[in-house]
């Protein structure tokens, strides 16, 4: 079972923990799906889409737990990215950890295992 990753804003994640459902950020809702990345893609995604942003939570989901709503679609550079066409049940989240910024302004990632 592969882990996939999403960078949630802290307030949105706290709301999800309270309700049991995460519906994504405004950007996700505008695109019609929740953006996820694999372990090899997530650092570049953070640099491109969340550069310098504080107050993020990195959530790790088991891809199999997201069911048929998870689609692998071509995106940046032709790579296949996981896109979820639905909400994330908090029960599908293996872990959620703060995504801090280092002194260099880049996000410091936890072990992605």
Image (cartoon, rainbow, N blue to C red):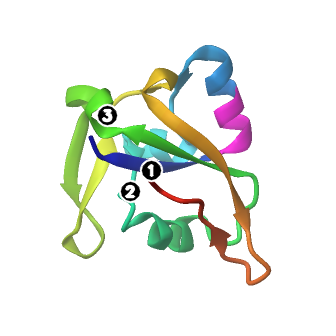
Of residues 2 and 53, the one nearer the viewer is 2
Residue 26 locus on image (x, y percent): 56, 42
Give residue 85's mark: 3
Give residue 5's mark: 1
Is the N terminus in the top left, top right, bottom left or bottom right quadrant?
top left
- The quarter of the picture where residue 51 lies is bottom right
Q: Which residues are magenta?
A: 9-14
Q: How far apart, in angstroms, are the residues tagged by discs 2 and 1?
A: 5 Å
Magenta stretch encompasses residue 95: no
Residue 28 locus on image (x, y percent): 46, 44
- The quarter of the picture where residue 41 lies is bottom left
Question: Is residue 106 placed above or below 9 in the rendered structure?
Answer: below
Q: Earlier in the sequence, mark 2 or mark 3?
A: 2
Is disc 2 surrounded by few (<14), some (14 to 19) or many (20+) residues within 10 Å? many
Question: Is residue 3 placed above or below 78 in the rendered structure?
Answer: above
Secondary structure at numbered mark 3: loop
Mark 2 touches mark 1? (CB < 8 Å): yes
Secondary structure at numbered mark 1: strand
Residue at x-position 71% and y-position 42%: 10
Residue 80 locus on image (x, y percent): 21, 60
Of residues 95 and 28, the one nearer the viewer is 95
Residue at x-position 25% and y-position 76%: 77
Residue tagged by mark 2? 37
Of residues 23 and 43, the one nearer the viewer is 43
Residue at x-position 26% and y-position 37%: 70
Q: Nearer the viewer, mark 3 or mark 1?
A: 1
Residue 112 locus on image (x, y percent): 48, 57
């Amino acid at each position: 079972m592969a882990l996939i990753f999403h960078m949630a804003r802290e307030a949105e994640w706290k709301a999800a923990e309270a309700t049991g459902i995460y519906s994504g950020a405004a950007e996700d809702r505008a695109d019609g799906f929740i953006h996820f990345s694999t372990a090899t893609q997530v650092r570049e995604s953070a640099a491109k889409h969340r550069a310098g942003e504080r107050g993020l939570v990195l959530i790790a989901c088991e891809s199999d737990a997201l069911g048929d709503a998870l689609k692998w679609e071509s995106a940046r550079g032709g790579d296949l990215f996981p896109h979820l066409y639905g909400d994330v049940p908090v029960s599908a989240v293996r872990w959620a950890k703060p995504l801090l910024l280092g002194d260099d302004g880049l996000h410091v990632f936890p072990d992605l295992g």
